[in-house]
Image (cartoon, grey):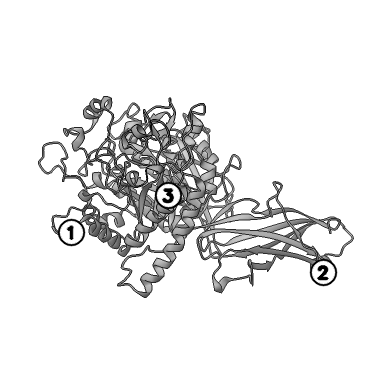
Amino acid sequence: MSELFKIIQVTPNDTTKILIKEIFTITVTLQLLNQKIDEKEFLKDIDLELWTDLKCDESKKVFKEDIQGYAAKLKFHNRTNDIFTFERTFIPSEAGFFKFMVRHKFNNSINWGWFQTESGKKEIEIHVEPSWSSNTVIYNAFVRQFGAIDKNNDGVINPGEGGTFNDLIKRMSYFKKLGINTIYLNPIQSAGEIFKYRTEERNYYENNLTNHLPVHMHPGSVYSIKDYKSIDPELGLNENIPDTDQYHEFKRFCKICHKNGIRVILDIVFDHTSRDSFIQRLHPEWFIYKKDPMSLEGEFITHDHPDADKYWGKPEHAFSPYDHGVFWTDCIMLNWNYYYSLDTLAPDKSKPPRNPSIEQMRDYFKNVLIYWIKNYGVDGFRLDVSYAVPAEFWHDAILECRKSAKNICEEREKHPRAQEVAPLSPDILFIGETYVDKVNELQNCGISALNGDFSSKVYTVEMLKGYLDYAYNISGNFFPNGSRWLLFPECHDFNRLPKKFEGSLKNKDSDVKLNKSRWVLAALLPGIPMLHNGYEVVEHENVSVQTYSTINWNSEKNISAYISKVNHIRNKYVAFQKGKYIFVDSEQGTTNSAQLYSFIRYHQSENEIEAFLVVVNMDFNNKVDGIKIDLPNIPGFDLNKTYELTDLLIGEIHKREGKFLTIILGPGESHIFKIKQ
């Protein structure tokens, strides 16, 4: 057989991510080695089979059922000289982790040969992701801040004046008008109340927190969780329903979101807990201990250590998370038998003991995820510090959550009174937080999308293009095909944009121009856009994860209408949701001083081609006055002939001919051109 032909390529040949209902094709290319063989005879005698466990729609199924999944013959597609191409197309119907293999034989041989990649792999992984991940626009609501009101007009937010779920419910029409279809909440669980700070840190926090309260009266960091199945009581306050509680209010919020077609994503923190976490009392062995828990020096204390009675099991001696050279002193690190930060940043220091009940801990945290799906109908999770938790745990947890969600959705349909809530669909979305750590490993383990580092790459054309070329495998093969990224100009982790750029804001409205330009990029570049609460009113002050803070919703610098227009453009056209992306060069080049970031988004279906040209002036102080851009070839268009450019932001129509366009744009302004021919 090897003397007659050889398989030279199978596409895809490595882990690939696709969407539910997305047409997907597997291609096998082989070379005929014996030129004397007649083509018809060769095609008659060659057997190429695809084996897979992929779930497909019954109406679209192209496979015959087999014990191990499905098997189907690959169909001859075309021939070029001695190169033959075979392919099979299918449409997945269910999210999950699947695989396929290709086998071959010739002339009724009883022996099959299995294709292997250069690395020796026979099985190629296919991750089928939630279809709604492509068309979602996320609003990030930090509940405590979103609805906070200074009721006493004394310039500070007091306990009981923070935001609530009811504040979000009252703004539901606002979210819909803004073009939002997913709301992501930072952690809503009860925060730790004791051991918040070391003694020497108290003065620092008292002087830097945003109001007059002493440290012990601050609500504490939402990322220092005391009880994973609890909800902060303050978030459930509702003057209109005095006898309600936080659990009923959150369920009401989820129900109303779903009624309005809006999904809910919760922030989940599995790397660490608060020092007074109840699981530390129940399972002290799930944590690690030191005499000084905020030091890399000294040994870890085991349960049989001579000084165990003094230190082991004591919350004040539980080791704090150590991340990029910083100890998070109000938290204690869970022992996943995985010490990424310690191994990377302190390789010469002592390592913690193994967790003796790691499987029990893994089961507990999987059940935490399922609890929020079953009891509140949560649609997805943002995984805080996901790189500090083993990737194989995330892989297993995702499988179990989606399996449970499917059962919950079916139960809701059959018995709506017994199962009063459910996700909008069983394809639960998982977004992992990482900026530079374990990025490829997390993309490969099955997490739907990653935070990425977009918010720190929006300074210049050169910086942003380099990041996107890396993230989307344009400058090399770094991640699985189809990997997705969250695109957000701001989030709770970093300074707001006007703070980042405050030394460069030369004009009174430069901050408005800054925010408008960066939102066009976030919304229309490939990825999942996320709008952080307050961005739409050009808020300068950061959110405080430790205490109360507010947003000036009455700001004159309100760009909600502009953001709404951009979002509705994205929601209307498939090209912006899952179309191809092509960078467009300008005569300024791709430099730190260049002003224009321009790109094409296009999508081809059976019925039409959608194509758009987006041009953004990233310079929020100065006008672009007559800069030429050079359009690339766009499939389905002949740019040497007349074509129309309709600016969807202002409605102007321009007729042009040729690949060169001259751009005039005000500071921070954008064109969103629909191309028609």
Q: Is residue 348 left or right of residue 87?
A: left
Q: Amino acid at mark 2?
A: Asn
Q: Is residue 3 visible?
A: yes
Q: Residue 335 in the image: state x and y as whole percent.
A: 43, 41
Residue at screen point 54% across, 44% down: 441
Mark nearest the camera among 1 and 3 is 3
Instruction: Give the numbered dot on residue 527.
Output: none
Q: Amino acid at mark 1?
A: Thr
Residues packed near mark 1 inside 10 Å, few (<14), some (14 to 19) or many (20 plus): few
**In whole angstroms, how far apart are the C-alphas of marks 1 and 2?**
73 Å
Instruction: Give the numbered dot on residue 108.
Output: 2
Q: Amino acid at mark 3?
A: Met
Q: Is residue 110 left or right of residue 602?
A: right
Q: Is residue 630 visible?
A: no
Residue labelled with disc 3: 361
Image quarter hosting the N terminus: bottom right
**In whole angstroms, how far apart are the C-alphas of marks 3 and 2?**
53 Å
